[in-house]
Image (cartoon, rainbow, N blue to C red):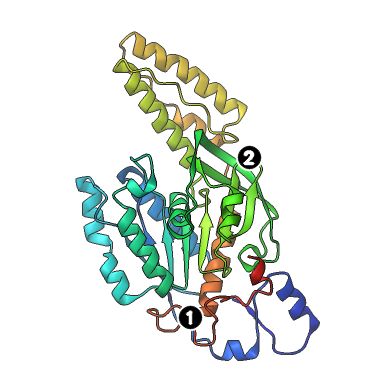
Amino acid sequence: MPLVEHNKLPTFQRLRDEGQVVLRPGQASKQDIRALHIGILNMMPDAAMQATERQFYRLIGESNPIAQFHVHPFSLPVFERGEKAQKHIDKYYNTFEEIKEAGIDALIITGANVSQPKLPLEPFWEPLSEVFKWAHENVTSTLCSCLATHAALELQYNQARYGLGYKRWGVFSHRVTDKHHPLVNGINTRFDVPHSRYNQIDRSQFEAAGLHVLAESKEAGVQMAVSPDGFRTVYFQGHPEYDSISLLKEYKREVGRFAKAMREGENLDYPPFPLNVFDVHTQAILNEFRYRLIESVNLKKELTAFPEALILDHIDNSWHDTAAAIMANWMGLVYQVTNVDRRLPFMDSIDPDNPLSLKKISDA
């Protein structure tokens, strides 16, 4: 929870200048303590839906040992679901109408699989647009993950993503580009983030939209940015929510697709390793498995089992602590400015165009 500037100690202003939240007595006296209500629009396909759900729940739950969080997942009816996934949604998820009626303090929008060459052609485009419009008027802050970031920039700023021509896949090093923004307060200036995508929005496009970049990678591009007001929308292009084994599981699925295509006589390249994930020992195991898998298919024998058990102890997680810290900052900032009525985005004293009272908001 934030410090309160209860006297004129110069350290308070110094910490504020560094990006730490320090409340003035008048601000502190107006805050009402209550639980936060967080919505999660889960657009992931069936195979990843519950894993994504757990990943974001975990980050929210770890973000503060004092505050209480009510998390409200929902999806969009336009996504075709299998029987098991639909039962899960029907039993445990809210509808968007219920979310709008009750209100939420913050919203997370996940990525999604696409089937069309352009995002506006996707079946989810119009209903997702409705969610963005409603959130802008009614939610304190919205966090967009991966494809949701790409959709938001095209919807709101006419900045369309472009195809890389390959899959940007792996764990990449990033640097904080604005050490004084409260969202990155207290995190390492260099940190890792997983990425997994075929498309990208460049820094020049973020800047053309008037957005403020907070962290980026030389290899993977922009990871984190915020809307011109500094807080209403937070954009992630990577996947800091990923579990330690998420990229391993994804690689395993890619190998499975290769084996299926090969058995059906289709020509498909064997998937490359995700970058900066597998050590030399693991790569040796997987290269041996590749040889045996192809041999099994050629000889029409039972497929060799993927050697997951031999690999798990060699998979490291170098990003979760930073992801948890950023989530904690985000939750804390939402808590500072949201209205006691969760149907309203801000306390009466908050300026929606600069909710964090940032000095350099005009440069964002």
Q: Evaluate whether residue 245 shows in this view.
A: no
Q: Evaluate whether residue 146 shows in this view.
A: yes
* Drawn side of residue 180 relative to residue 68, left or right: right
Per the model, the C-alpha gap separating discs 1 and 2 is: 37 Å
| Residue kind at label 1, given as amino acid type | Phe
Front residue of this view, candidates 145 and 84:
145
Q: Earlier in the sequence, mark 1 or mark 2?
A: 2
Front residue of this view, candidates 314 and 2:
2
Give the labeled residue for mark 2.
Answer: 219
Q: Which mark is residue 346?
A: 1
The quarter in which the C terminus is drawn is bottom right
Relative image position of residue 321 (x, y in whole percent): 59, 55
Relative image position of residue 161 (x, y in whole percent): 48, 46
Q: Residue at x 35, y 17 (%)?
A: 262
Q: Which mark is residue 9?
A: none
Cβ atoms under marks 1 and 2 closer than 8 Å: no
Q: Residue at x 71, y 75 (%)?
A: 16
The quarter in which the N terminus is drawn is bottom right
Relative image position of residue 152 (x, y in whole percent): 45, 57
Using the image, determine if residue 356 lies above or below residue 247.
below
Label 1 environment density (alpha carbons within 10 Å; few <14, some 14–19, many ≥20):
many
Relative image position of residue 283 (x, y in whole percent): 56, 25
Q: Secondary structure at mark 1?
A: loop
